[in-house]
Image (cartoon, rainbow, N blue to C red):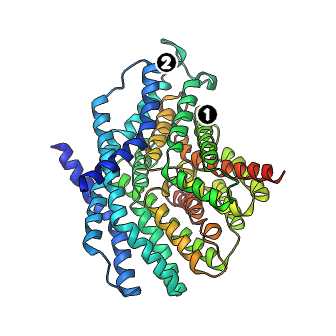
Amino acid sequence: MEFVYDFSEILLGTCRDVLPIILLITVFQLFVLRQSIPHLPRLIVGGVYVVLGLALFLAGLEKALFPLGKIMANQLSDPAFIYGAGEIVTHADWKAYGWVYLFAAMIGFATTIAEPSLIAVAYKANEVSAGTISSWGLRITVAFGVAFGISLGTFRIITGTPLYLYILVGYLVVIVQTLFAPKSIIALAYDSGGVTTSTVTVPLVAALGLGLASTVPGRNPALDGFGLIAFASLFPIITVMGYAQIMHWRTKR
Amino acid sequence: MIISIILKKLQQAIKDLLPIILVIAFFQIVVLRQPLPQMGEVLFGALLVVAGLTLFVQGLEMGLFPIGESMAHALARKGSLFWLLCFAFALGFSTTVAEPALIAVAAEAADIASKGGLIESSQESQKQYAFGLRMSVAFSVGLAILIGVMRIIRGWPIHYLIIGGYGVVMLMTIIAPKEIIGIAYDAGGVTTSTITVPLVAALGVGLASTIRGRSPLVDGFGLIAFASLLPMIFVMGYGLIVFG
C-alpha cells in the first residue's frame, strides 16, 4: 500500500517534469512554425510511456541503484574488512583500499564499453578522421580513461584532497592537447565528456562516492562525497584527443 | 508485434545492465564473500529500473525524437535567428528538467546537505534545495545550447570558448562555498544523458547542414560540450546564493 502511495506521488512529480517539453512542442509547432502536430496520437502514447517509464525508473532507483552503490562502498571500505576486526582507526591509510580502486575501475570500464552514446561517437569519429581512428580502439581507450578517472576519484575521496586541484590539472592537459590535436576532432572530443555518463551509471557512481565518504574515517559526505562524475566526464576528453593524436602521428610517419 | 518490440527493448536494457551486474557479482562472491543484504528489494528495484528505462526510451523514440528532430530542421531552415535562439534555449531547458539522472542526483544532494546541517532538515527545504539545483542546471543548459547555436551560425572556433569557460570555472571555484564544489563539478556530467543528447545533437547537425560552408561532421558537434561546462559555473553561483 505504501508503495502505491509513493509511486503515485512520483508519478505526479514526473508529469510536472515533462510539462516544459509539452509546452515547447505546442508553442513552437502551432505558433512559430504554424503547422499542425504530425502523428498526434502516436506522440500522446509516446508521452504516456515517457511519464510512466520515468516514474518506474525513479522508483526503482531508490530501491536498487542508490542502495547498491552505497552497500558496495560500505562493504569494501568497512574498517573490519580492511584493517581486520577490532582495530580502531582514526586516520584512513590510502594504501589499504586496493579493492575500492579496483571496483571503481571495473564499474567505470564495464559501463563505458557498452554505452550506446559512446558507440555513436566512436562511429562518427571514424568518419570525421577518414578512417585513421578505429571505432573499437577509441571505445577501449575511452573505457580505460573512465576506469582510471573513477578510480582516481575514489583515491581523492579516501585521501580527502581538494577536488579542484585534480580538475585544474585535467583542464591544463586538455588545453595543451587542444593545441596539438587534429582540428576536426576537437569538438567531437569535447562532446565525448558529457556523453559517456549515462542514466544508469550516474546514480550508481554518485552513490559509491557518497557511501565511501561516509564510511572512510575522517571524511564528510557533504564535502568529499561528490566529484566522481566530474572525473568520469573529464577523462574521455583527454583520451579521445590523445588517441586521435597518436593515430594522426602514426599515419603521418 | 508490440510484444516483440518490447521484448527486444527489454533485451537491450538487460544487455546494458549486464556488465554492472557481473562486476558486482564478482565482488560479492570472490572478494567480499558475503551475500548482498536486502537482495530481494534490490532485485525488485533493478527490475523497475529496467522496465522504466525501456518504457522511457520507447516513448522518446515514438514521439519526442522524431518531432524534436523535424522541429529542429524546420527552425534551422526558417532562417529567423530570434526564434532559433528561443528554441535552442527552450530545448536545453525543458529536456534538462525531465532528465532522470539529474532528478535523482539533485534529491540525493539535498539529502546529504540536510544531514550535513547545511540546509534545514525539513522535507520542504530539501525539496526547495533540489528544485533550485535543477533549475540552475536547466537554465544553464538552455543558455549553453543558445551559445552553441550562435557558435555554429557564426563559425566561432570552439576551443577559445571552452578554454575561456574552464577559466571561469576555476575563478568561481575560488569564491564559491566549498560545500557546493563537488556537486557543481558533477552537474556537468549529469545533465547530458538520455533526452538531451539525441535532441541537441539533431539540432546541431541540422543547423550545420543548412548553413552554407559548414560541415555537419565538424561544426555540428560541440553543443554537448557547452552543456556540460556551463552547469558547473551556474551551480557554483547557486551555492553562493544559498550558502554564501
Amino acid on which the number 1 mark rests in the picture? Phe
Q: Nearer the viewer, residue A82 or B84?
A: B84
Report the chain holding disc 1.
Answer: A
| Quadrant of res A32 | bottom left
On screen, residue A226 above or below A91: below
Amino acid on which the number 2 mark rests in the picture? Phe
Name the image quarter holding the N terminus of chain A.
top left
Give the residue pinned by disc 1.
A155
**How much space separates mark 2 and mark 1, taking CA atoms?**
18 Å
2 and 1 marks on the same chain: yes
Residue B147 placement, left or right of A202? right
Q: Residue at x 30, y 41 (%)?
A: B47
Report the label total. Answer: 2
Q: Nearer the viewer, residue B86 or B67?
A: B67
On screen, residue B56 above or below A29: above
Question: Few, some or many C-alpha atoms within 10 Å of disc 1 (few <14, some 14-19, many ≥20)?
Answer: some
- Checking the image for residue A14, the label placed there is none
Q: Residue at x 64, y 42 (%)?
A: A162
On screen, residue A152 above or below A164: above
Q: Residue at x 35, y 38 (%)?
A: A64
Sequence-wise, the earlier of marks 2 and 1 is 2
Q: Residue furthest left?
A: A1
Is residue B219 in view?
A: yes
The location of residue A102, given as percent across then percent down, is 56, 29
Give the residue pinned by disc 2.
A81
Task: For mark 2, give the secondary structure.
Answer: helix
Residue A177 placement, left or right of B44? right
| Quadrant of res B155 | bottom right
The location of residue A95, given as percent across then percent down, is 63, 23
Report the chain holding disc 2.
Answer: A
Residue A65 placement, left or right of A169? left
Task: For mark 1, give the secondary structure.
Answer: helix
